[in-house]
Amino acid sequence: MNIEPLPTGRPPEISVTEPIEPAYERVKQMLFRPFDLGKWFTIGLGAWLAGLGEAGGGGFHGFGGNYNFNGHHSNDQVLQDFRHGYYQVRDYVADNINWILPLAVIAGLLLTVFWLLLLWLNSRGKFMFLHCVALNVAEVEVPWMKHAKAANSLFRFRLVVGFLGLVVILPLAVFMVVLIGQMMLGGEVTLARVLPVVGLGAGLALASLVFGLVHKALVDFVVPIMYLRGGGCLAAWSEFFGLLTGNFWRFVLYVLFQIVLGMVIGVMVLTAIVVTCCIAGCLMALPFVGTVVLLPVLIFKRAYPLYYLRQFGGKYDVFAGTKTNGE
């Protein structure tokens, strides 16, 4: 599929369904024509780094939790248990603050360093995986070195956005937890107490949605533009905003269709887990191994936005230099 831009730089049609077929073909070309287990593991390394530290990054994370619903505890008993546990924890912390505070500071610093390392590796992995999908190659060293500058620019941008997200989201979450705790300790649930919690929850959901959309646009479109231009993250954002302002509703439709597509893929993955009697699920839960098992899905999810972006003209075609002519 070769789409040439019009003199205005915009193609006549932008479809959310048309990229499905070439993305599916890309998966077959990369992984099954021919099948090469070594290629799976090599590309899998880039895919694993590209998802490192993100939801579903190291493997498949299932749904559910350890919930205990039984009728032996009334609401009053639950509130009493909560108060008892709260006062125990408060008293323990107050009695041992001399060593808990330094330990908390050290743990916070170590977690920050670990998060920075994950974010840096993830940013490098984004370009490694994109490189492999765009060129249909299984390479590690070449994309690691070639796209180092762009990946570092991406890392710095994500670091700033992550800090902003922390400044915005953390206070909302803390205040909401505090208000809920006060209600449980006081034993009174009134409209005057519930409304602030609802408002904070709505604000938390809205902020999470905004930062989620920023991340979606960054991974799906800004990173490919950086890959094509070899420039920094801010320059790629500027170019993407030019596309977004002229095609706002097209991108809204894209996001909505991605939600549907994600649900379909989720059903397919769960079906595979059930059919294999949870063997596939166990493999997906393993770090790196889960990424290799899910590699067809991950390649499809990486290729789909690339084919969508290509519809805006040849200058957005990351597949132009592919080593396998199967487009």
Image (cartoon, grey):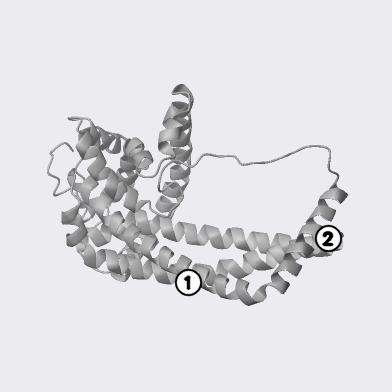
Front-most of residues 320 and 111: 111
| Secondary structure of the residue carrying numbered label 1 | helix
Q: Earlier in the sequence, mark 1 or mark 2?
A: 1
* Residue 222 shows up from this direction: no
Q: Quadrant of the C terminus?
A: top left
The image quarter containing residue 15 is top left
In the depicted structure, whether residue 68 falls above or below residue 194:
above
Q: Residues within 10 Å of mark 2 (few under 14, many from 20)?
A: few
Q: CA distance from mark 1 to mark 2?
A: 40 Å
Which residue is label 2 attached to?
Answer: 191
Q: What percent of the width, then of the height, locates residue 230?
A: 20, 64
Q: Are marks 1 and 2 in contact (CB under 8 Å)?
A: no
Q: What percent of the width, then of the height, locates residue 176?
A: 69, 64
Front-most of residues 246 and 229: 229
* Residue under the point 42% across and 72% down: 160
Q: What percent of the width, then of the height, locates residue 239?
A: 30, 65
Q: Quadrant of the N terminus?
A: top left
Front-most of residues 310 and 210: 210
